[in-house]
Image (spheres, helix red, strand yellow):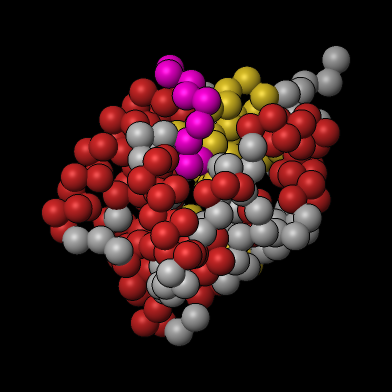
Amino acid sequence: MNPETYTVEAEVHRTHWWFAGRRRLLRRQLRRLQPQRTWRILEVGAGTGANLSVLAEIGAAQVVACDMAPDALRYARITNVEFARADACRLPFASGSFDLLLAADVIEHVDDDTAALCEFVRVLRPGGHLVLTVPAFPALWGPQDIVAEHRRRYRRGPLLDLIARAGLPVHTCFHFNYLLFAPIWAARKALLAMKVRVSSENVINTNLMNRLLTRVFFADVDAAPLLRAPFGVSICLVATKPVAR
């Protein structure tokens, strides 16, 4: 993408209700892990750095952010972060070198999600944590999936099986964005039926809508880990690499 595109993307990631709500969710899940300042943390698919502020807030002193598009990383506004160009399926890091790995809406973009997950497990130290979010329910497939070049959307059961085969025991897994599930499903089906093309669903927004949906989504992500709704637009998962005995 050209620099102007990254500038717009970075601003959307900073202010849009979806990204603000996801940061709120990630912040709470990360704090539950009781991160230590000595932890070394990797974010795979960091993009323009939408989640790096969360890693700074939890007190992380050693953060590595990687993405296939290094130009995007230049728009991250967080200091003391090491940036690297990296493929999720071939991470250029030593085995067991990270205490925490964050992959927020990443593995749906890669052809071989099993290979990516195996790499995540490899670079985590024993006892290290994976925090993952993915889009849920193939029935929600719509223009945004096409624009974002998603390969798939996930169901909870098969996702848990996938993580288990990679060798990670899962201790937290829940849907979120369940309050907006029905309207998002209806809107996406309508857009597909009418063959409407949009550069991104994120542009279908106004200041008033953004404020309203931010409140709705904040309430959603606050309750999601406790409510454990059987559906949602996305899934959040936390797993921990076993410690050898």
Residue 193 placement (x, y as % from top left): 47, 65
Image quadrant where one finds the C terminus: top right
Residue 130, picture quadrant:
top right
Q: Is 78 left, or right, of 166 in this rendering? A: left
Q: Is 3 left, or right, of 165 in this rendering? A: left
At 19% from the left edge and 53% from the top edge, which residue is drawn?
209
Residue 135 placement (x, y as % from top left): 55, 46
Frontmost residue, 13 versus 177: 177
At 36% from the left edge and 40% from the top edge, which residue is drawn?
180
Question: In this view of the protein, can residue 130 be seen by the observer?
Answer: no
Magenta highlight on residue 227:
yes
At 69% from the left edge and 30% from the top edge, which residue is drawn?
157
Q: Is 215 left, or right, of 155 in this rendering? A: left
Frontmost residue, 97 versus 137: 137
Frontmost residue, 207 versus 64: 207
By secondary structure, the bulk of the magenta-drawn segment is best described as loop
Magenta highlight on residue 79:
no
Residue 197 placement (x, y as % from top left): 44, 74
Residues drawn in magenta: 226-234
Residue 218, picture quadrant:
top left
